[in-house]
Amino acid sequence: MPVVVRAVAAPDLGYVWEMVRSLAAYEHMTDILTGSAERLAGLLFQDPPALFGLVAERSDGRLVGYALYHFTYSSFRTNQRMWLEDLFVEESARGSGAGDQLFHAFVADALARGCHRVDWHMLESNPARSFYERQGARRTDGGLLQYGMDATAMQRVIERG
């Protein structure tokens, strides 16, 4: 069944949140799933939005995929780039073109917003690696290591003064 990709709308949030939960389960990360549909709505629909979203909708009205993304910034280029936080297509719709259409719409939106590149993380074990490579994406981690801190570690920094 054909799909149409469009911007996420408020009535979509319940099902988008269910797909977020499905992605967390797929990636074995439900232990860090602490958000809510309400908080997601706040990020998507505040002015200006902190997060952008797309959905893939079948002709029967059923949502089968989503993409969430946001700006990051390059000081070297003094320009924004776009970070793809999630791109998810339900298993029953994989191979239907929904992922291609979501990715295309994401890239088109990034270009329309003046971004010079798009980036994302993915698990090494994710079979979608070949999907992204077919789109023309290549690993870009060459020598760069990612570091991070959770709230507990950040609090320790503050306490140490």
Image (cartoon, rainbow, N blue to C red):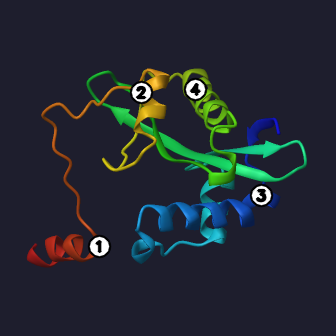
SS at circle 4: loop
Q: Earlier in the sequence, mark 1 or mark 2?
A: 2
Give the number of the mark in front: 2 or 3.
2
Label 2, label 3: how many angstroms apart (C-alpha)? Answer: 29 Å
Q: Secondary structure at mark 1?
A: helix
View extreme (right): residue:
60
What residue would you read off at disc 3?
12
Q: Which residue is mark 4?
A: 113
- The amino acid sitting under disc 2 is Glu
Residue 29 lies, in percent from the top left, at: 41, 68
Task: Say few, some or many: other residues with alpha carbon within 10 Å of mark 4 (under 14 / 14 to 19 / 20 or more).
Answer: few
Spot occupied by residue 80 in the image (x, y as percentages of width and height): 43, 30
Disc 2 target residue: 133
> Residue 101: x percent and y percent?
67, 31
How far apart are the two marked residues, 2 and 4, measured between alpha carbons? 24 Å
Q: Position of residue 35 (x, y in %)?
A: 53, 72
Q: Secondary structure at mark 2?
A: helix
> Callout 4, which amino acid?
Arg
Q: How many marks?
A: 4
Q: Is residue 103 visible?
A: yes
Q: Of the two numbered discs 4 and 3 on the same chain, state the one appearing first in sequence.
A: 3
Residue 143 relative to residue 10: left or right = left
Q: Which residue is identified by label 1?
A: 151
